[in-house]
Amino acid sequence: MAQPFQFNRTELAGSLGDLGALLPLTIGMIMVNGMSITGTFYSIALFYIIGGAYYRVPIPVQPMKVIAAYAIATGMTSSQISAASGLVCIFLLIIGLTSAIDAISRFISKAVIRGVQLSTGILLMSQGLKLIMGNSTLQLAGNIAEPNLTLQTIGPVPIGLILGILSTVIILFFLKSKKYPAAIFVILLGLLTGLIWGTHADFDLIRPGFYLPALLPFGTPEVADLTVALFVVVLPQLPMTVGNAVIASTDLSKEYFGEDAKKVTYKASTLSMGLANGLSFLLGGIPLCHGAGGLAAHYNFGARTGGSNVIIGGIFLLLAFFFGPHILPIIKLLPLSVLGILLVFAGMYLGLTILDMFARKDMFVVLLILAITLTANLAWAVLAGIILSKILQSDKFSI
C-alpha cells in the first residue's frame, strides 16, 4: 500500500527546510548567468511534485553544486549551463537505464558514504555561516551583507548576526514541536524582516498574470558550448552526483523512512535526476539533483511524506505561473542570514550520520574524504575514498 500524503504544519515546515541550499545558488545562477527565471521555477516545481508523487516520501531538490559554484564564479553563459543540463541528463539516463549505477554502488562502501555525508554537512554549515556573517561569494560580490535590506546593523551588531541568533533560538526551542514547527517560524521571521526593512527593489515592476515557460529559450547548444560544459563542469560534477545525490541520499532515505522508501533506489534516483535535467534543458532552467543534505533538512524540520514535496513544489509552481519573470523581488524578501541558519542546521544533522562509524579504518576513510573535500573538492574526495576503502579491506593494512 502506497504511503499516504499528509498536509499539515509539520509537512509544511519540513518542505521549507532546504530553502537555504536551494535559493542562494538558484538566485545566483539567474542573476549572474542569465538562466530563465520562469523555466527554473517550473523545473524545480515539477521535480518536487512528481518526485513526491512517485516516491511517496520527501525527496530533495537542489542545484548541482559543482556546476553552480563554478558557473557563478566564472560567469558561464546561459547556453553553456543549458548544455551542461543536457549532458548530465544523457549521462544519468545511460547509467540508470543500463543499471550501471547498481554496479557502481557495489564499489562504494558505507564508510565512503559517511565521508560524503560528513563532508557535505560541513560544507553546508560553512556556507550557512558565511551567509550569516555576510561573507559568502554572493554577498562579497555586492560588497553588502544583506543586499535586500535597508537595515544593515543595529548599533554595532550586523543585522545578519542578530537574525542568525534569533533563528537559532527559535529552532532550538521548537525543533521537536509538531504543534509549532520551527522552520515555519524562521521563514516567517525572515519574511517579516523583509517586509519591514526590505529595499523592495523592483516591486513596482511586478506584473501578476499567467506565465508559461519558453521551450529552449537559449536555442540548441553549439559544439563549443557542449565542449566547455563537458570538460569544465559536467565531468567534475558526476562523481559528486553519484556519491552524494544518488547513493548517500538513497541510503539516508532508507534510514529515515525504512519500508516507506522502497521506491527510492539507486536506479530510480539516477533516472529521476536524468529526467529532471532533461526538463531543465528544455525550459532553460538550472542543473538539478537530489542530495543527502537536502533530505536531512526536510526530515529534521518535520517532513515525513511526499506531501511535503507537493507543498513546496506547489509554492514554486504558483510563483512561476502567476509571476513568471517577476519572481525575484518576492524571493528577495527572505534575508540571506535566515537561509544561512537553515543551512547550518541541515549540515549539522547530516554530519551526525557518522555516529555509527566505530572501526578505525572506516573513520580513516571518512576523515580523508573530509580533508580532500575541504582542500580540493568532493568529486576528488569520493574517488580517493573509494580507492582507500578498497585498500584498507586487506588484512595487510591496519590503522
Image (cartoon, helix red, strand yellow):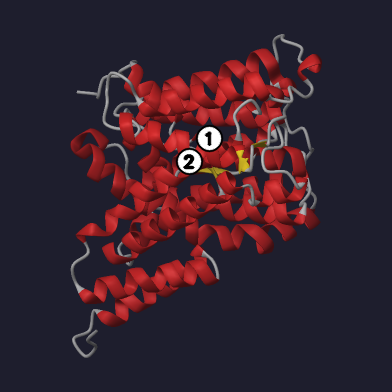
- Kindly identify which residue carries mark 2: 341
How far apart marks 1 and 2 lie (CA) works out to 9 Å
User: Which residue is at a point 30% across and 47% down the rendered structure image?
Assistant: 252
**Residue 160 shown left or right of residue 101 in the figure:** right
Image coordinates of residue 366 in percent, x first then y, are: 34, 68
- Which of the 4 quarters of the picture holds residue 208? top right
- Kindly identify which residue carries mark 1: 163
Q: Earlier in the sequence, mark 1 or mark 2?
A: 1
Residue 309 position (above or below residue 126) = above
User: Which residue is at a point 77% across and 39% down the rendered structure image?
Assistant: 34
Q: Can residue 270 be seen in this view?
A: no
User: Which residue is at a point 52% across and 47% down the rendered structure image?
Assistant: 128
Say which amino acid is labelled 1. Leu
Q: Quadrant of the C terminus?
A: bottom left
User: Which residue is at a point 66% across and 36% down the rendered structure image?
Assistant: 285
**Residue 386 shown left or right of residue 166 in the figure:** left
